[in-house]
């Protein structure tokens, strides 16, 4: 090879490595790598993709930065905590990797408050998802998606023709891993503090290949754009979850039965309630499990209309105390530390859940072993007592019937309730009531006879 040829080859090699060393970055490394104006606004997409845009506006992902509780938790807890404690300093930027990806990519950290109306407010927008090409590594988590913003939109179909942009068929959008990039989260202690995709993967839906999109973006016949083709299976951008009362209602089923159909005052009767996560492809609660409470309340009513609340029987597993409501238990003391309140003793751990009720939850513990709603401040878990998909849990209630129980029918009702945010925390942080308001998920009644 002549010297000239050699230098041309070397120059080419140098040129191609220069191209190769600059692929889009993923996860933490993507901070500050893409200015805001690389992304189009949802209002642009909405001119043609009308129905999808209207659906998405009503879904939580379009409000992931602006919704009241998100704003309160980031600006009043996570951000001050990150500025004070080195161990959790990464969340100053990190929360935004999932909640305000445009601000994260633009390096606009911390983003301006919601009222400033910056592009952070676009939250998880159309152009965030439709410019994701894949993810880095083997496990999707902590926003490790790879974003290539620009004129090419990633979509599910071959040869979709648009006057506004190019499209590229990308099967990654049809995979659960796509959702997992934001729906799995590891905290500064290396713990999985959000694991919806991992729960799905090890559950029956993951094994059967029934992906997130089947339940959260079901297909309907129609067009995806006003001037587009009709298709039998246009993916609806519903993304309904814990904030959709209708989605939560009925997702857990319950049936209760007595051991005997007749009993006399003074006898002991045992009732069994069977609780099933019948409709979710992951545990219930999932995702923000640190703040959710799902509970089983059992109440008996005698022939004269007097009611008795029955406390659940203990099973004796480690950490069980966190799963039985106790009005005296305090928790969330780290809120006081974050806010520098020396005399803060904590808040009622179980909010308004009645004493003795079984709580299906994953208790998150801070370094001092106290329950926390700050998933970024979690150093351990007490137990995992949530409802796994398509699995049933039996809870028993042993009741010594009062001597004065009147003869006649005794109706026992089991009710499952769901609350997105434990009420004591919601009240203390002034999160609007809708966030903690209990949702009636399901209930069932049974009867036995009290003998003379
Ligand atoms: C001027 C109208 C117009 C605008 C503006 C527009 N699109 Fe489209 N888009 C279309 C049409 C038409 C199609 C083809 C639909 C079909 O026939 O299935 C399409 C297809 C798509 C597809 C591919 C769907 C598939 O089937 O694979 C995606 C993804 C997409 N658009 C996203 C966006 C996003 C994101 C924006 C905003 C940044 C946007 N579009 C703005 C008209 C538009
Ligand atoms: C078989 C249907 C089904 C599948 C598959 C499924 N989900 Fe769900 N999902 C539900 C139902 C029903 C609910 C409402 C009950 C609840 O809140 O857990 C729900 C709730 C949620 C919530 C709110 C959970 C909470 O407790 O805050 C999120 C987030 C979610 N799903 C994301 C996902 C992701 C991501 C995947 C895939 C890894 C997925 N889902 C797979 C049915 C499904
Ligand atoms: C959270 C991520 C996410 C957001 C936000 C999002 N999409 Fe999608 N979109 C998807 C996924 C995933 C699919 C493909 C699902 C499949 O086929 O399994 C899809 C499909 C589409 C399609 C093709 C539908 C079809 O089946 O023909 C269009 C068009 C589209 N999206 C446009 C938009 C527009 C416009 C917005 C904003 C208003 C938007 N998307 C917001 C994830 C998202
Ligand atoms: C870029 C990050 C990102 C991606 C990708 C993503 N999500 Fe989300 N998702 C979020 C964030 C952040 C929230 C929390 C919104 C909020 O603050 O309430 C959320 C919330 C949700 C909710 C809960 C709504 C509720 O009512 O509580 C559902 C359901 C959901 N996503 C489904 C999906 C599905 C299905 C996919 C894949 C097709 C997906 N998401 C992909 C970031 C993402
Ligand atoms: C890896 C992505 C990711 C990171 C990082 C992340 N979140 Fe989230 N966040 C989500 C998803 C996904 C949901 C919705 C889960 C669900 O509905 O169950 C969510 C839900 C929430 C909610 C509850 C909204 C609701 O549904 O009730 C708040 C508040 C919140 N996040 C704040 C934060 C704060 C503060 C940080 C930083 C300390 C943070 N998040 C970091 C993905 C993330």
Image (cartoon, rainbow, N blue to C red):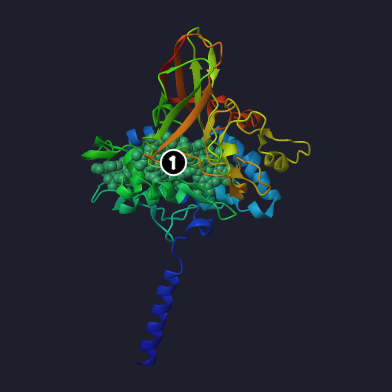
Image-based side of 318 in relation to 178, left or right: right
Rendered residue at 34%/45% (across/down): 205
Q: Which residue is mark 1?
A: 283
Q: Nearer the viewer, residue 422 or 137?
A: 422
**Ligand 3 - quadrant of the structure image:** top left
Rendered residue at 56%/10% (across/down): 404
| Numbered disc 1: secondary structure | loop
Q: 343 above or below 150?
A: above
Q: 446 above or below 28?
A: above
Q: Nearer the viewer, residue 49 or 450?
A: 450
Q: Residue furthest right?
A: 342
Q: Residue furthest bottom?
A: 2
Image quadrant in which the N terminus is located: bottom left
Residue 245 lies in what quarter of the image?
Answer: top left
Q: Residue furthest top?
A: 304
Q: How many marks?
A: 1
Q: 411 above or below 314?
A: above
Question: Is residue 400 shown to the viewer in this render?
Answer: yes
Residue 154 at what x, y percent from top left?
Answer: 33, 51
Residue 47 at what x, y percent from top left?
Answer: 35, 36
Q: 410 above or below 359?
A: above
Query: Within 8 Å: ligand 2 and the Cβ of disc 1?
Result: yes
Q: Nearer the viewer, residue 394 or 179?
A: 394
Residue 49 at what x, y percent from top left?
Answer: 33, 37
């Amino acid at each position: 090879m002549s010297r000239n040829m050699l230098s041309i080859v070397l120059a080419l090699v140098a040129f191609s490595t220069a191209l190769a060393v600059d692929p889009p970055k993923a996860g933490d490394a993507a901070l500050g790598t893409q200015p805001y104006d690389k992304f189009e606004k949802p209002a642009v997409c909405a001119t043609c993709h009308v129905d999808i845009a209207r659906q998405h506006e009503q879904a939580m992902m379009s409000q992931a930065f602006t919704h009241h509780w998100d704003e309160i938790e980031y600006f009043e807890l996570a951000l001050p905590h990150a500025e004070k404690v080195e161990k959790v300093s990464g969340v100053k930027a990190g929360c935004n990797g999932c909640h305000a990806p445009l601000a994260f990519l633009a390096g606009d950290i911390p983003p301006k408050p919601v009222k400033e109306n910056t592009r952070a407010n676009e939250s998880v927008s159309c152009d965030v998802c439709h410019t994701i090409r894949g993810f880095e590594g083997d496990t999707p988590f902590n926003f490790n998606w790879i974003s290539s913003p620009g004129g090419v939109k990633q979509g599910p179909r071959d040869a979709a023709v648009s006057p506004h942009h190019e499209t590229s068929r990308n099967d990654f959008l049809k995979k659960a891993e796509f959702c997992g990039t934001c729906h799995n989260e590891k905290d500064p202690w290396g713990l999985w503090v959000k694991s919806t995709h991992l729960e799905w993967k090890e559950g029956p839906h993951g094994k059967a290949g029934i992906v997130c999109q089947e339940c959260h973006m079901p297909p309907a016949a129609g067009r995806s754009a006003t001037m587009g083709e009709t298709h039998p299976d246009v993916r609806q951008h519903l993304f309904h979850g814990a904030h959709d009362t209708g989605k939560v209602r009925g997702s857990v089923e319950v049936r209760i039965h007595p051991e005997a159909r007749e009993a006399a005052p003074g006898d002991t009767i045992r009732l069994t309630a069977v609780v099933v996560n019948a409709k979710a492809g992951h545990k219930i609660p999932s995702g923000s499990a640190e703040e959710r409470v799902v509970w089983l309340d059992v109440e008996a009513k005698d022939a004269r209309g007097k009611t008795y609340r029955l406390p659940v029987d203990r099973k004796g597993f480690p950490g069980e105390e966190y799963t039985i409501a106790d009005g005296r238990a305090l928790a969330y003391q780290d809120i006081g530390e974050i806010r520098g309140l020396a005399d803060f003793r904590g808040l009622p751990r179980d909010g308004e859940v009645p004493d003795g009720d079984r709580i299906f939850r994953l208790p998150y513990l801070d370094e001092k072993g106290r329950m926390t709603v700050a998933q970024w401040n979690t150093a351990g878990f007490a137990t995992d007592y949530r409802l796994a998909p398509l699995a049933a849990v039996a809870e028993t209630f042993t009741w010594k019937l009062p001597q004065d129980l009147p003869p006649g029918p005794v109706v026992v009702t089991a009710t499952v309730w769901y609350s997105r945010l434990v009420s004591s925390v919601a009240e203390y942080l002034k999160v609007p009531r809708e966030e903690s308001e209990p949702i009636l998920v399901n209930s069932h009644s049974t009867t036995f006879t009290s003998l003379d």
